[in-house]
Image (cartoon, rainbow, N blue to C red):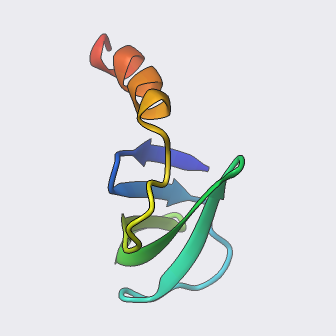
Amino acid sequence: MVTNLSANGVVVQGVRRRMRIGETIDVRMGSNKGQFRVIWVGEMSELGLERVDGNSFLPISTLAQFAQPAATC
């Protein structure tokens, strides 16, 4: 489950596979896919991921859609 996202990174929770800092993984959200590097590992199977490829993971319109409600919290 994605708990936080930005243009260059994502935080996911509930990862069942043991991951190490520095590993790269492919992340898919709908039809969008990007390659990310694990930059931190938290409690409860939470991972902080940073985009490593040059492709846009999510369209700017998608980020704007989620940013608007978050800004009003």
Judge whether 11 appears above or below 24 on screen.
above
- Relative side of 39 to 16, left or right: left
- Relative side of 32 to 61, left or right: right
Q: Quadrant of residue 13?
A: bottom right
Residue 58, x across and y down, in percent: 49, 46
Q: How many marks?
A: 0
Q: Quadrant of the C terminus?
A: top left
Residue 43, x across and y down, in percent: 44, 66
What residue is shown at x 28% (from left), y 18% (from top)? 71
What residue is shown at x 54% (from left), y 48% (from top)? 2
Residue 6, x across and y down, in percent: 35, 45
What residue is shown at x 42% (from left), y 55% (from top)? 10
Give 45 or 20, whichever is nearer the viewer.
20
Q: Residue furthest left?
A: 71
Q: Residue furthest top?
A: 72
Residue 48, x across and y down, in percent: 38, 65
What residue is shown at x 51% (from left), y 57% (from top)? 12
